């Protein structure tokens, strides 16, 4: 894990990511994808599906396929400074990236029986493998996007001194339930491995150095350890405005430290998330001051 020391002044790039969830007998599980080692952004790290906002995400046809009035998306994101169309396009970007990277497609298949729904999803995957654009896949298969199991969760803005990359992003994180009849799998291009894990288990794997993750994923997993079911997560997301998280990086005794809202060294004194308010970069990984237990407290 190479630490960046370059101060960046450019405006963060808009991005969207989906925390994919499913219920199990042992509690919720989260989908994690391993980024291609050769990637210029977080190569080799485990992440949630997601990526940059694309100009096609505001295509009129895609906007027409959404299942709610666009004003609702704008209100749910809680960002008065962006346009209604921009808010809607962030939802589309999240759905598109999830489909491209994991094969999960959030479209309305409720009018079909299970076999027909599975077949239609399979057709969409075939078109994706052929390189057909997302908008054309929806047109060809007459699909409508669904957001009923998709909710805004948090907003992460990369600070001017990023820890792991030389790029800045303004990423809207969503939470979503994966449809029961769809199987999530990495694309073997941008992503080289996929795994479902309970949030606590993923953090344990990280702590044992079995997997590598960036701070937003670590902190999000820490947050998700508080919930037992996907309904719990989605209902919580519906109740409040997405948390705004812009880490404050500082140097203490030669150690990079990321402070989060609620920490005494962060300009925002109100907590944005449960879990630790400070992560230190120690031995090539992020560690809370109180050790592993801080992730769960």
Image (tube, rainbow, N blue to C red):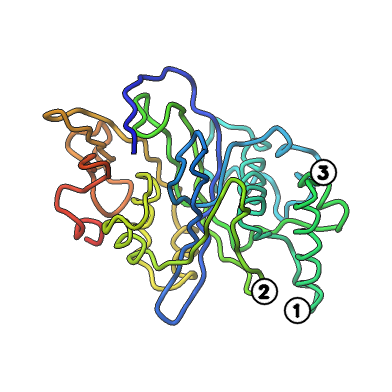
Instruction: Residue at 25% x, 31% y: name it.
Output: 267
SS class of the residue under badge 1? helix
Where is residue 133? Give x, y as percent.
78, 44
On residue 114, the disc is 1
Graded by Cα atoms within 10 Å as few (under 14), some (14 to 19) or many (20 or more), the crowding at tag 3 reads: some
* Residue 59 or residue 30, whichever sits in front: 30
Q: Earlier in the sequence, mark 1 or mark 3?
A: 3
Graded by Cα atoms within 10 Å as few (under 14), some (14 to 19) or many (20 or more), the crowding at tag 1 reads: few
Instruction: Residue at 76% x, 52% y: name it.
Output: 128
Graded by Cα atoms within 10 Å as few (under 14), some (14 to 19) or many (20 or more), the crowding at tag 2 reads: few
Instruction: Residue at 67% x, 46% y: name it.
Output: 92
Quadrant where the C terminus is found in the figure: bottom left
Quadrant where the N terminus is found in the figure: top left
Q: Residue 63's quadrant in the figure?
A: top right
Where is residue 50? Give x, y as percent.
56, 46
Side (left or right) of 240 relative to 119: left
SS class of the residue under badge 2? loop
On residue 181, the disc is 2
Instruction: Residue at 62% x, 36% y: name it.
Output: 53
Side (left or right) of 265 relative to 105: left
On residue 61, the disc is 3
Q: Are marks 2 and 1 in contact (CB under 8 Å)?
A: yes
Where is residue 185? Give x, y as percent.
60, 61
């Amino acid at each position: 894990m190479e630490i960046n020391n370059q101060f960046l002044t450019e405006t963060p790039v808009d991005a969207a990511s989906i925390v994919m969830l499913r219920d199990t007998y042992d509690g919720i599980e989260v989908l994690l994808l391993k980024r291609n080692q050769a990637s210029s952004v977080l190569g080799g790290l485990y992440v949630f599906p997601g990526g940059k906002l694309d100009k096609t995400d505001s295509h009129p046809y895609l906007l027409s396929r959404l299942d709610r009035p666009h004003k609702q998306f704008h209100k749910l994101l809680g960002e008065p400074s962006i346009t209604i169309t921009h808010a809607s396009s962030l939802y589309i970007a999240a759905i598109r990236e999830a489909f491209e990277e994991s094969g999960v497609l959030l479209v309305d298949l409720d009018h079909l029986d299970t076999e027909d729904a599975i077949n239609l999803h399979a057709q969409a995957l075939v078109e994706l493998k052929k390189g057909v654009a997302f908008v054309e896949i929806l047109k060809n298969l007459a699909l409508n996007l669904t957001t009923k199991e998709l909710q805004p969760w948090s907003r992460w803005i990369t600070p001017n001194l990023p820890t792991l990359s030389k790029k800045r992003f303004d990423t809207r994180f969503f939470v979503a339930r994966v449809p029961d009849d769809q199987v999530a799998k990495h694309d073997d291009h941008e992503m080289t491995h996929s795994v479902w894990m309970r949030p606590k288990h993923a953090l344990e794997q990280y702590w044992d150095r079995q997997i590598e993750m960036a701070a937003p994923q670590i902190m999000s997993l820490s947050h998700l350890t508080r919930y037992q079911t996907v309904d719990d997560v989605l209902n919580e997301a519906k109740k409040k405005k997405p948390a705004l998280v812009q880490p404050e990086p500082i140097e203490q005794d030669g150690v990079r430290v990321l402070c989060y809202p609620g920490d005494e060294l962060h300009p925002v004194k109100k907590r944005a998330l449960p879990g630790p308010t400070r992560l230190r970069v120690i031995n090539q990984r992020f560690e809370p001051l109180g050790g592993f237990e801080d992730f769960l407290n």
